[in-house]
Amino acid sequence: MGLSTDMLTQLGNTGLKICRVGFGGIPIQRLTVTESEQLVHAALERGINFFDTSRIYTDSEAKMGRALAGRRNLAVIASKTYSRDAAGARKDLETSLAELCTDHVEIYQCHNVSTEKDLERILGPGGALEALEQAREQGLVQFVGITGHKPWI
């Protein structure tokens, strides 16, 4: 089936072409593995190719990974770490890759940065950004970022 090309947009200056409608990973926490697979497959069949999840969304990564098995080439995956230090971020990324059954993700972000102290920790020496930049150099992550709900941060 799929969506028409007018439903695709370029994500910032990444060059990634994603559907204007994305699939957020929070709700599948409440679904069974089978229901999650059916939902992800239905999304793919309708042309949805952007899948967003996080380490803190309980089993969301594992459910997405299982559902995207054999269809990984159709998906742009974004996930996130809540760790603020390099060691924790690297460990979270490795867990994310294993749970998502993939050797890379297109986007990996520091999640819900809500204080200046968190931002300083992430960007400072030994911070999460160090690990994410190293992972990008290693081809494990294509793009890195920060998420949050406070624009001034």
Image: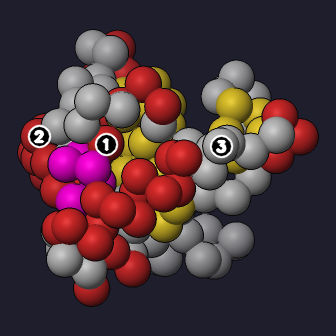
Q: Mark 3 points at which residue?
A: 1
Q: Sequence-wise, which precedes: disc 3 or disc 2?
A: 3
113 versus 143 height, above or below: below
Q: Residue furthest right?
A: 6
Look at label 2 and name its amino acid.
Ala
Measure the C-alpha gap from mark 3 to mark 2: 30 Å
Look at label 3 and name its amino acid.
Met
151 versus 9 height, above or below: below
User: Residue 119 appears at what percent x and percent y?
Assistant: 45, 61
Q: Can residue 11 be seen at all in this image of the molecule?
A: yes
Q: Which residue lies furthest to the bottom in this view?
A: 30
29 versus 37 height, above or below: below
| Element carrying mark 1 | helix
Range of residues picked out in magenta: 63-67
Measure the C-alpha gap from mark 1 to mark 3: 17 Å
> Which label sits on residue 146?
none
Q: Mark 2 points at which residue?
A: 98
Instruction: Check the picture and name the quadrant holding the C terminus.
Output: bottom right
Look at label 1 and name its amino acid.
Leu
Kindly report which numbered mark, 2 or 1, lies closer to the viewer in this rendering. 1
42 versus 127 height, above or below: below
Question: Toward which corner of the image does residue 141 lie, by quadrant?
Answer: top left
User: Residue 102 appears at what percent x and percent y?
Assistant: 22, 31
Q: Name the residue under label 1.
A: 68
User: Residue 99 appears at what percent x and percent y?
Assistant: 14, 48
User: Residue 52 appears at what percent x and percent y?
Assistant: 46, 56
